[in-house]
Amino acid sequence: MRRLLQFLKKFRDFIIFLLLQAFVLSLFINSKNYHKAQMVNTSSGVVGWFIEKKHNITRHFHLGEANDSLAIENAELRSQLPESFYKLQDRIYYINDTLYEQQYEYIPAQVINSSDNRRNNYFTLNKGTKSGVQEGMGVITKEGIVGFVVDASPHYAIVRSVLSENINISVKLRRNNEHWPLKWNGKDNSIVQLNGVTHDIDIREGDTVVTRGNKGMFPENQTVGYVNEISLTDGKSTKNVNVKLAVDFSSVYYVYVVQNFLKEEQLTLEGDLFKPKGDE
């Protein structure tokens, strides 16, 4: 208490000066509407700046939760697209019409480990059999296909990437439905090849390559990439066709696992009639 009194006594003149200044300033501001408004606006601006910064920081910590929510919503919306339904009769329809039956659903997942610089490349997903993921299911992103599930545990799944040898995914040109197996020569992780394109085929640079959908892993017409180079080799009856992949495999994170409700029925009926030489 003594020290407080000593402090007040020592700086009493300065304290009185500050109090008088504050009193005079308040009288001045209250007597002038313009100055009063300026003070209010200035304080509001400062408070607003701090609120905005707080909001941005808070929003940053909730980005993961927001992204997960969007992935689930996107999967539900994708399941309602026309290509996710099987047509029961050949006529105009609405999605909720009984002429169509749900064929595909999509399970959202995240890539937690991956490779893209080996001869055979894989992804690890954070969803497994408890989420409905099974071996043989296709995996896509919003840009295009990435591969298919080769193994699954209760909580995780391993996906074989398109960037693998003997991948043998059946694809076609969107423009004319000409189809071939997709291959990768292991050289460039953004370029794959079409095998068996004969000279009589009308194929052009810029053509869109999509899935054929014949083995039930992927819905038909899922984007694979775009023809970016066509060349000829002397003595060969086929063209060399390179396809620029639509997906950047070095940055794949959010994916959708494709669940085809009619796949087993198709494969059981076909038996060994169309048994693939490779993986698909």
Image (cartoon, rainbow, N blue to C red):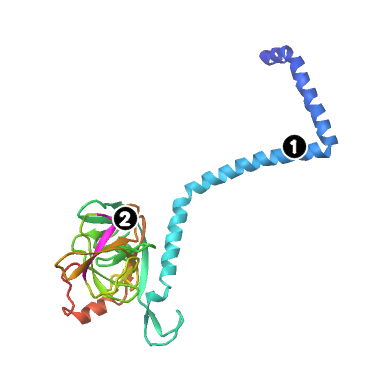
Task: Report if residue 280 is visible in the image.
Answer: no
Say which quarter of the image contains residue 142.
bottom left
Q: Residue at x 64, y 43 (%)?
A: 48
Mark 1 burial class by Cα count in 10 Å: few <14, some 14-19, many 20+: few
Say which quarter of the image contains residue 237.
bottom left
Contact check, label 2 and label 1, Cβ < 8 Å: no
Q: CA distance from mark 2 to mark 1?
A: 55 Å
Give the x, y percent position of residue 90.
38, 87
Give the x, y percent position of residue 238.
19, 70
Give the x, y percent position of residue 201.
26, 74
Q: Which residue is mark 1?
A: 39
Q: Which residue is mark 2?
A: 249
Disc with the residue nearer the chain's start (2 vs 1): 1
- In front of the other: 101 or 221: 221
Give the x, y percent position of residue 32.
84, 36
Mark 2 burial class by Cα count in 10 Å: few <14, some 14-19, many 20+: many
